[in-house]
Image (spheres, rainbow, N blue to C red):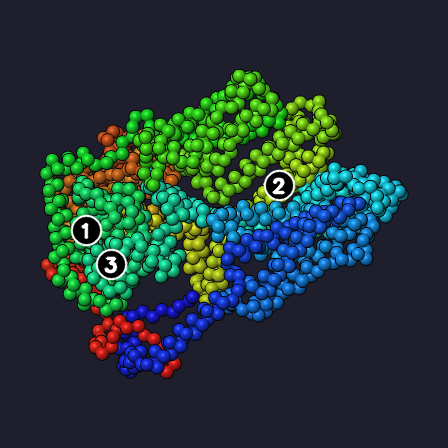
Amino acid sequence: CELWTLKRSVFQQILVEFPRSRTLLKQINTKQNDEQYRRRASVHDALKAAERAKRNATRYIHPHSLFIQGWFGVILGVTLYSMIVLPFRVAFLENHEISPAWVFFDYFGDCIFLVDFIFRANFEAFFDENNNLVVEHKAIWQQFVKSGKVKWHVLSMMPFEVLTLAFPTLCPLWRLQTWSLFRLNKLLRVIEMPSLIRSVESSLAKVGVKVPKNPLKVVKLLLVILLLAHINSCVFFAIANFNQHANSGDLNAQHNWANAEGLVGPSPTCPGKIVSLEVVGEQYTAGLYWAMATISTAGYGDITADLNSLQEVLYSTLILIVGTYVYTLVIASLEDIVAQLDVTSSLYKMKTDKVNTYAQIQCLPESLKGKIGAYNDQLWRSHLGVKGEKLLKYISPALKVELIQNMAMPYLEKAFFLKDCNADFVHYIMQCLELELYLSDDFLFHEGERGDALHILTSGSVDLLTSQGVKFKTVSYCTLGETSFFLFEPQICSAKAADSCEVFQLRMTTFLNGLDDYQLSSQFREYLAAQHSSLEEAKASIENTINNLSSSKMVKFFDANDDVVKVPKGVILPDSNFRVVWDISLFIGMLYLIMSIPLQISFAGIGIASFVVDLLVDIFFMMDVYFRLRKFAVVRNGYIVSRPNEFGKLYRDGVSFHLDLLRVFPASILAFAFFDVRNQYYGICRLFQFLRVLSFVKYLEGVTEILSIKTRFTVTTATLRLTQIFMVILILTHWFSCSFHFIGDQGAEFAETWIIVDEMQYESLGRRYLRSFYWSLYTITTIGYGSVPVISINERLFSMLAMAVGAVICDAGLTAVLASILQNKDKQAGTNNRRIQCTKLFMATNDVDERLQSKIIEYFAYEDDEMRNIDEADILNDLSSSLRSEVLSHFSFDSLRDCAYFDDITDGAIFSLVQKLEPYLAVTGEKLSVIGEPCYALYVFQKGSVRTKDATGSIANVAEGDIIGHVASLAASRKEGLPTHSLEITLISANFSKSKNGNPYVIVKNGRYRCRSLIKSTRNWMETIDMKVKVENADNIHKTELIVKEWRKRQNHVVVGFGEIVVMESSLGDVIVCPIHDDRGRKVGTIELRAKLCRLSASDATTSHEMTATALNFSHLYRLRVGEVDELRTYLELSRRSNVVERIPKHGEGIAMELDSAVDWELPIILNKES
């Protein structure tokens, strides 16, 4: 059902704005006690009871019952019997008599159709438009007639076979053929086959049989192709047979394909000799072979319509048209299958592709990339790649509450204030809870961070840490941050996930909004004032534990007991180079097995060299089993399992262990060594190893991941899917070529096969393989040259299988995959193009300045080409709150910590500000700050090019990590004072031993002021950097720090080393050679420069801290609103007050109204027409 909801707070606001409605509410409450109201309710209940009794007294079949679903399966089977048997008997069973068995099966199916008609017309209930179950027989009949199925059912049940009493034979059709011809009306039930198949799928699902959706679609497509081929083969042969009978004995007039193939006699008669079943098999195989070649568009041309037979030519033309339509239908269906092919997995892979691209563009460190990858993997295992917040949105609000109630209610019942609230407010809280996933070592919160979230830990465990990072407690299945949340204080400790955790979070803003909506603000204040002592006691207990850890002895004790992941000797980690080589070797070995074993079975050639290679490959896979038991560490739930007994147990408990034991069974080695088996039986014994093909996708994805990690080449989902389909085509071609050769080689001793006719019996095995591979390739790709003859029945049956597989998997499948990939690319390209065209039209219509138009188009080009349509905000929001904070901290935490504006804020509070950062892209020419204008936001510069200019006109390049904003520069100037001197540094040249693959640049640092040079591509730099500095000593000597960094592709801003120069005011600007040392003190290069220090003149002296910051090109920054900082400072100030009630933020006081005491506000309201 669909409902419109009215919130209680909104309803109470209506009562305030419309006083007369309160009188109406009183009247409604009074009427609920009225006797007339009770009488009406009683009558309503009696009507419902009568309806239920009527339904119980009526005989009907529920449309969702297992009986009716199973019955539809029976109808489907009888329909398939009619489709297959009736056309076959009409076309091929020439001169056969009507046997009792045929009569029994035919009339048994007729009885089934008759009973089905009775069920459908009288007893199959249905749901009307109001979703009410209708069980009356008359209504069921009317619904059956209205559906339009009656006429098809009646026509299919008509006994037209009684006409055989008047026309027992219709030569050349004898009795059985005539009988079957008059029963072809049963094929009208084919119209219902789609609905019958859906009913069978539903019934299988209800009994617990899970049928994969996409493979089932492929099976249905193959079924359609085979049924069409069957019917067309019957018709095509019937046309030829009629021609043969019509011209019996006249060899010159017998123009039909069956006569050309020698499948019919030259002088057939009716009645005549019964055609044997062996001949019928040859005739049917040839007809089916022609039909499959035509429908699949393979078109060998070895069996074709006789050009002198108008009927055959017309029918072949019709089938070619039908085949094209079917082929188009198959492509469209497969494209839909590919588009929906495990749609959840596809969406997940698309998301991970974007995340990987973002990590590559932003040059994230490998450790952070690994954590993001581990988070996505764990999210896939637990939620199929959907973040908890989005997952809960899939569920209706009522079911969401029920789900959360089942998982989190035990903790809410013990939580402060919530345990004593009314059910409505708790219901609201459960609706607003957010589900978050944390991996091992993820921080839920830091010590000193704002306590604006209540964490409910429903799975996993969490370590509580002091400010020094010492673990003092591990908790699980509890509520975290309760004291800080309800006392409105910063967190008193840090919480770090010990393993993978699922946490429900209640945000402070959500809680305060709920208090306002449910008129509980005053009640909460009173409750907090009266009950806050329990929170203070819990807080004091934690603080005492932390204070007791101040002794070094206790710290050592907890450090000794801390769980540190230590890799045992000999254990190989997943990201080691040996493991990479090993996994690639596994993939190569698997390819060798699935290619060599079919060759060994088909061509029966095995020598000592081949045996040695097989032996080495088998030993390699045996070693793989041992390594996985004792040597190979694995990643589970986001952390490494490195103890052999643990990862060995995980491997033994899985399905892959038992499968690997089966796949390493050395049957072929034993057969060769002890029985000297060297023929096809050797290859058959190696079918155990052939089972490696089941791991093809896993091995391929493993190699793809290795390429992505080790070469930094991102393999997209589209590339992976194309690679898979091409490899599948080549492998299938190889398998079919080996099988085709095997069939021809085995039958060459007894009859003609393609090897005999094609004169390949004396050729080498290599020539034979090349010939069979050629046949397999043009058959699977449905090109159908037909140059390799297909002779025997077995070869034709196998060719039909190859045609069907090729048409579905290779030809249509490849087309569908390409179409799906191009559709996704065209969708993005179309979106980009539409955005540009619409914007251009808008700007042209409104006469926008051409310069502005050019800037907008440049912005679109940058988003499409450089950023690859990646929205950083969306990427960050898809991560967990911990990972999002870690990514933002990587770029901005040190910058915020070093900023004088935040000197009064603790590290934990800095993490609160980090969570408020927003990605921001500054366009070319954009002013981020302007002298004389208010400062509403701070910007942490990440990459791009931004230049500042002070009031005197001094220009400097902003270094990455610098903070832009008047309030930041004001705080720095207050702490360090205004500059007194001008420092001019001229960079001449540089020589670095570590900077061979990157482009270096220099950051000049004076206190908290920094300035950056341009990125250099040669050793001759020649650039002058002007800075204004404050010299505080009387000797006018100033020390300046030089930080050398370099920019590398996909590895931005790598520190090369550090240097220092000392400049005096009396310096004449002589050349200085500054040595550069790395963080270990090793010399890595030198910079040749000149430095001059001059006192600022009165006109150049800076009188204001403000600067104008301008983006020179598209620049990436992180924006922090100044209001967020002010709000945090207010929160920290309020948290120090002794009166806990005064700490509550002025979020909103709710609606001030006086509720009428005469109205029961908890009573449900029921309106009727009189009210």
Identify which residue is drawn at 28% across, 49% down. 458
> Which residue was labeled with disc 3?
508
Q: CA distance from mark 3 to mark 2?
A: 60 Å
> 815 or 481: which is nearer to us?
481
Identify which residue is drawn at 30% across, 26% down. 569
Disc 3 marks a residue whose amino acid type is Met
Identify which residue is drawn at 20% across, 62% down. 420
Describe residue 1103's horizontal placement relative to residue 246 as left or right: left
Element assignment for label 1: loop
> Which residue was labeled with disc 2?
806
Q: Please state the horizontal and vertical placement of residue 17, each as a whole percent of the image.
A: 28, 78
Element assignment for label 3: helix
Decide which of tag 1 and tag 3 comes sooner along the chain.
Answer: 1
Q: CA distance from mark 1 to mark 3?
A: 14 Å
- Quarter residue 774 falls in: top right
- Quarter residue 780 falls in: top right
**Image quarter hosting the C terminus:** bottom left
Q: CA distance from mark 1 to mark 2?
A: 64 Å
Disc 2 marks a residue whose amino acid type is Gly
